[in-house]
Amino acid sequence: SDLLSLATLKGNINGVTGQIDDKTRQLDVLKKRLRKTKKLRRAVGILERVRDAYHKTALPQKVAQSNLALMEEDINKNLEAFGSPFWVEADDNLSFLVHKPGEPPHKAERLSGGMKGVLALSFWPAVNSLYKRGLGMMVLDEPTANLDEENTLFFRDALALMTSQVRGRRQIIMISHADSLKSSCDQVIELSLQQ
């Protein structure tokens, strides 16, 4: 009876040992799967970030936003040269926030027509500087349309300064009915309709 009990115990021990070995193998397989799953999750996370950055709609916006930020300093230097009472900062919507002394920042769309014209004139050389090659021509078609006299004169002075800065290197072509802008130009061609 003692031998039988001992044999039964040895059998139970061998059975439990076999189960332990089997469970150990299963645990090793699960650990390998877990490591592989973690690697796959990391890879998926990386791929999702790459997809988000390089998606056909995201990448152009990121590049444009980056370029606007790079141009901020040049634009503000140009605005300062024009004697402008504001400076700009690129925002996240591919636009500019305008800062004026004593006022909260606002979107560039709220600038007066004359100030928008000065911002456009300040933007042009900044684009040129960013790409390090000559943008040889700027065409202005009725830039003072809908401007009051004060803004037209401000625009004229800014244009005269721009003309002197680019003389001999670039061309500014303007079509306008505003006689007050003539003094900003090196050459004026007047057209009239003959009947």
Image (cartoon, helix red, strand yellow):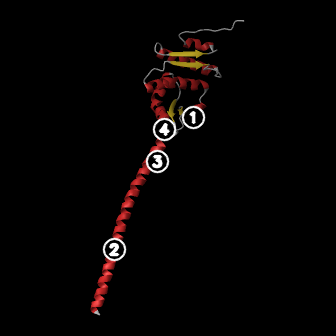
Residue 129 is left or right of residue 114, and the answer is left
Residue at the spot x=48%, y=26% of the render? Answer: 127
- Mark 2–mark 1 contact, CB under 8 Å? no
Cα–Cα gap, marks 3 and 2? 41 Å
Residue 158 at x, y percent in the picture: 53, 19
Q: Nearer the viewer, mark 4 or mark 1?
A: 4
Question: Mark 4 and mark 1: span between their CA atoms?
Answer: 24 Å
Which-is-in-front pick, marks 2 and 4? 2
Q: Residues within 10 Å of mark 4 (few under 14, many from 20)?
A: some
Label 3 or label 2, whichever comes before in sequence order: 2
> Which label belongs to residue 107?
1
Three-letter amino acid code at the position of disc 1: Lys
Q: Quadrant of the C terminus?
A: top right
Q: Position of residue 24 (x, y in %)?
A: 34, 69
**Mark 3 touching mark 2, by CB under 8 A?**
no
Q: How far is the residue under mark 2 from the one under mark 4?
A: 55 Å
Q: Quadrant for the N terminus, please.
A: bottom left
Residue depicted at x 33% and y 82% = 12
The amino acid pointed to by label 4 is Leu
The circle on residue 48 is: 3
Q: Label 1: state its secondary structure.
A: strand
Q: Which mark is residue 53?
A: none
- Which residue occupies the extreme left position in the image? 3
Crowd band around label 1 with a 10 angstrom C-alpha radius: few (<14), some (14–19), many (20+) = some
Residue receiving disc 2: 20
Residue 141, given in percent of the width and then of the height, sits at 60, 19
- Quarter where residue 50 is shown: top left
For badge 3, the amino acid type reads Glu
Q: Which residue is mark 4?
A: 59
Sequence-wise, which precedes: disc 2 or disc 4? 2
Q: Quadrant of residue 104?
A: top right
